[in-house]
Amino acid sequence: MKSKFILFLFITGLLFSSCNEKITYPAITSPATHVHHPGQFVWHDLVSPNPKASMDFYSKVFGWTFTTLGSGNDTYYVINSNGKAIGGISKLDPQYGTVGEWIGSMSVSDVSNALEYNTTHGGKTLFKAMNIKGRGKTALIQDPQGAIVSFINSESGDPALEIGKTWLWNELWTNDLTASMNYYKGLVPYTTEKVEEAASPYYVFKNSENKLSGIMNNPVEEMRTSWIPYIKVININTVVEKARTAGAYIISEPNPNVRNGTLAVIQDPIGAKFALQVIK
Amino acid sequence: MKKYRSFIILILLIISITLASCSNMHMGTSMGVSMNFGSNGPTIQPHMNIGMSSGGYYY
């Protein structure tokens, strides 16, 4: 009788602990730096209505592997590249749409202040600020021009200001260049520098002398203002063919007349857009 | 015999319609985008203005 009671308590305890289990997300940077660079993109998440199909695509094209955290509606798939966590995939609830999207996390010094700034300037808060174990304080917003981005104040600090092994760049494709520039310059300590060699107006967002992201007029018809992540590749034609074979739509093929054929823009089979660029 | 032939034709028609709907269908629109019906459901295929696509990281 006593052993049955102990077993009952044990099982109840297990159930209770699993119900209250909190996922510990991978740190934004490891080892921790505890230094923040407002305006830097420090993490990338893919929200997808079909995480399994998304994982299948990115494993075929880039060789990424995935670690599953949590379960049910709280499942989060950590993206690993060369043994390092570089991003995540979470399921997009059908009520928010049926098309995937890459969402970058922009470092801000104070998430609450950033949210207030966004609201004051006509943006929307999609998910209010919350503290996420292992990650820090974060919120999801839509800026006044329509771009979706996450604000974050990482508990481990931000990565070093250098080109990463996977993510090369983040670029805002905007339907209102002046309004978007002014918005982000007020949000984080960005200054802008015009790239004279660009074929169309292009500006780099800088914090001090560090190039943190770019902005240009939206080149895609019928698309809302969006942040586009760039993935670094060595052989762009090989990656484009892999993506095409895996079901992607190539929005822009490498073209010798556009940055010497070093760029491609891709829409994955679930609808998420990203760009490829060859690094020298 | 005539009934049997009609039945076979009907079956072949149904099979061909089914196979066609299983494959990726493509439909152009006049709005600068195309719609593709793939295994993951309908997706928009956006068109890019190449003359404006001078983005990317500048060293």
Image (tube, helix red, strand yellow):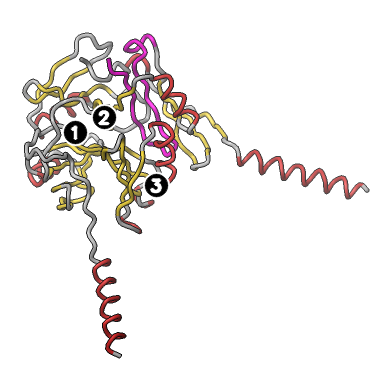
User: Residue A199's spot in the image, x, y percent?
Assistant: 28, 11
* Whether marks 3 and 2 lie on the same chain: yes
Rendered position, A69 above or below A186? below
Q: Amino acid at mark 2?
A: Trp
Q: Amino acid at mark 1?
A: Phe
Disc with the residue nearer the chain's start (1 vs 3): 1
Disc 3 target residue: A49
Q: Residues within 10 Å of mark 3 (few under 14, many from 20)?
A: many
Q: Nearer the viewer, mark 3 or mark 2?
A: 2
Q: Nearer the viewer, mark 1 or mark 3?
A: 1
User: Residue A246's spot in the image, x, y percent?
Assistant: 48, 33
* Whether marks 1 and 3 lie on the same chain: yes
User: Residue A260's spot in the image, x, y percent?
Assistant: 34, 10
**Chain under numbered label 3:** A
| Residue A184 image label | none
The reply to whether residue B38 is in sight is yes
Disc 1 target residue: A41
Question: Is the C-beta separation of discs 2 and 1 under 8 Å?
Answer: yes
Q: CA distance from mark 2 to mark 1?
A: 9 Å
Question: Is the C-beta separation of discs 3 and 2 under 8 Å?
Answer: no
Q: Residue at x 91, y 47 (%)?
A: B2
Disc with the residue nearer the chain's start (2 vs 1): 1
What residue range appears in magenta? Answer: A256-280
Q: Amino acid at mark 3?
A: Pro
Residue at the far bottom in the pictured view: A1
Q: CA distance from mark 1 to mark 3?
A: 24 Å
The one nearer the camera, A34 or B18, is A34
Disc 2 target residue: A167
Magenta residue check for A270: yes
